[in-house]
Image: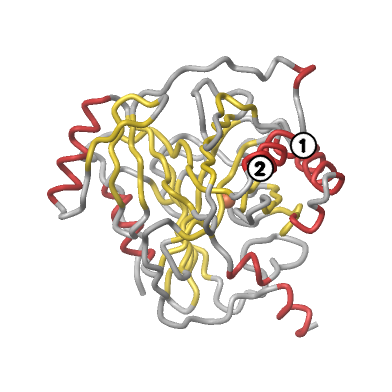
Amino acid sequence: MLEPPKTTQSPPFRITRASHLAYTVRDLSRSRDFYTEVLGLVVSDEDRDTLYLRGIEERVHHSLVLKRTDGAPACIRAGLLTEDEEDLEKAKFFFTQRGMRAEFVEVPHQARTLHTTDVAGTPLELYSKMTRAERLDQRFEALRGAGALRFDHYQIAAPDIQKAASFYADLGFRIVDYMVVSGQPVGIFLHIKDTVYDVVFIRRPGPALHHYGYIVGGINDIIRACDVAGRLGYGDHVEFGPGRHSLGHSYYVYLLDPDRHRVELLPPPSYYGDADDGPVVHDLTGVPRVTESWGLPPRSSWLKNASLFEGTVCTSPPPGGPEPSLEAYLKMT
Ligand SMILES: [Fe+2]
């Protein structure tokens, strides 16, 4: 049986947190409505082909970048914030030494930015400084939808998650939860900032973006997002939840945006731990509900669908046990 990888205490460069995502959508205006009205994100900037969004307490220019496409919607990159510019130089050296392409690029509203990929093939964007923006969480009269506060984490589907987690543990990420089925890791949850998660790997065909999460003020904001989604014709885009995870201890809802990219809303962390707590190993062999402490399992779309990354080849892990979908659960009961 594999063990959770050990976190290095002296990473080659310093990552502060998972910071943002960029992906493509077919109709920027429709996406703008969804993200501002349902999630309550604010528009930092926009032009004909790009929309920059942020949560209401974020002081960075963007945590979500949407680009217009005429093709199939896809994810472009996942963003990681480094401590300072010196860390970007060290990161370039680190990735290049491992045979991974790493190049500095110009990105609007971000200072020096490094494009590279992780060992799972996830296209990454590392930067240390971004245009500053006003914090809007006290503008109560302007708040919309869930009033999403800040970007929290993203989850990547990948076939070899042990390799992916080892890579991030070598960069200083700590493993919080380590899910195992029949001796195989099926979900590895890592963080580097002081909330529960930053980057999560789930054993499925990938690399692909399964979802990302924004923190909201509380459970009432999750319900409000569902209410607004329903009113705007997105009732069937409330894909999973509201419910409560048994891992991470968080309430959640997963919504599909107009292009079926998946976003999770969750309240501020209800679990705080110490840096030396070490991973909690969850053996889920034969457990009918993997991620919920109550309620029904996710529908099969939540288990199977993910946003592919542009220009990457998706590969599948060896067959494992069936994941407990709502459809399978209903057949059993
Ligand atoms: Fe999540």
Pinpoint residue 152: horizontal percent, then vertical percent.
54, 39
Q: Is residue 194 depicted above or below 331 in this figure?
A: above
Pinpoint residue 110: horizontal percent, then vertical percent.
38, 26
Q: Which residue is painted at 70% across and 47% down in the image?
A: 251
Q: Is residue 172 depicted above or below 132 in this figure?
A: below
- The front one of 133 and 322 is 133
Q: Which residue is painted at 76% across and 52% down in the image?
A: 242
Q: Is 91 left or right of 54, judged from the image as shown?
A: left
Secondary structure beneath label 1: helix
Pinpoint residue 8: horizontal percent, then vertical percent.
26, 46
Give the amino acid at mark 2: Ser
Q: Which is more N-terminal, label 1 or label 2?
A: 2
Alpha carbon of mark 2 to alpha carbon of mark 1: how far?
20 Å
Mark number for residue 31?
A: 2
Q: Nearer the viewer, mark 2 or mark 1?
A: 2
Q: Which residue is mark 1?
A: 221
Indicate how the structure is coloured in the image. Answer: secondary structure
Q: Is 222 left or right of 193, judged from the image as shown?
A: right
Characterize the local packing of mark 1: few (<14), some (14-19) or many (20 or more) Cα atoms within 10 angstroms: many
